[in-house]
């Protein structure tokens, strides 16, 4: 492409001062409420409405008796039970390994043979519970 130059008979001129200045005038004035505040009288009348909860997330208020009467605890699902038992198994195997110096793999294999499980992931909840009891006795 060829560059095309346009020629004019007059020099370039500015069209308006506001659009040409580096700092155009502000469209809104400053917010005076932030500088002046709401006043002590207004603050004292609204501060009693503010509820302050404890900052610590570990502190939770106990449920009211009415809520507790209608709250039904859900039984743990089977997959959640097995997941919890597998986590316990991992913790127990790690403790036995630290104490005896035996490899995790060997401990898992021995417990699986004793309980009849093919592997920890395929073990039933009953097999996991029996294996965990065996490990707890070994740590006992």
Image: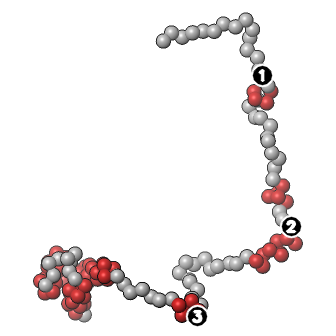
Residue 48 versus residue 100: which sits nearer the camera? 48
Whether label 1 touches label 2, CB < 8 Å = no
Q: Is mark 1 on a helix, strand or loop?
A: loop
**Which picture quadrant has residue 98?**
bottom left
- Report which residue position mark 2 lands on: 39
Q: Say if residue 96 shows up in the picture.
A: no
The answer to whether residue 53 is above or below residue 26 is below
Residue 50 in picture, x, y percent from top left: 73, 76
Residue ID at (28%, 81%): 82
Return the residue found at the far front: 70
- Report which residue position mark 3 lands on: 65
Q: How many labels does the image show?
A: 3
Residue 59 in picture, x, y percent from top left: 56, 83
Closer to viewer: mark 3 or mark 1: 3
**Which picture quadrant has residue 135?**
bottom left
Residue 15: image tag: 1
Residue 103 versus residue 65: which sits nearer the camera? 65
Mark 1 crowdedness (10 Å alpha carbons): few <14, some 14-19, many ≥20: few
Separation of disc 2 and disc 3 at Cα?
42 Å
- Looking at marks 2 and 3 on the same chain, the residue that comes earlier in the sequence is marked by 2
Residue 104 versus residue 30: which sits nearer the camera? 30
Closer to viewer: mark 2 or mark 3: 3
Q: What element carries label 2?
A: loop
* Image position of 105 (left or right of 68): left
Mark 2 crowdedness (10 Å alpha carbons): few <14, some 14-19, many ≥20: few
């Amino acid at each position: 492409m060829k560059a095309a130059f346009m020629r004019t008979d007059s020099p370039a001129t500015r069209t308006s001062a506001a659009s040409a200045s580096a700092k155009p005038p502000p469209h809104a004035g400053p917010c005076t409420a932030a500088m002046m505040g709401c006043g002590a009288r207004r603050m004292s009348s609204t501060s009693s409405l503010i509820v302050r909860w404890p900052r610590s997330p570990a502190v939770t208020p106990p449920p009211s008796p009415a809520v507790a009467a209608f709250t039904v605890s859900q039984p743990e699902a089977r997959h959640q039970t097995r997941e919890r038992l597998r986590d316990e198994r991992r913790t127990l195997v790690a403790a036995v390994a630290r104490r005896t110096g035996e490899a995790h793999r060997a401990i898992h294999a021995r417990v699986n043979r004793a309980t009849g499980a093919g592997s920890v992931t395929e073990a039933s909840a009953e097999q996991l519970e029996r294996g965990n009891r065996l490990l707890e006795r070994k740590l006992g």
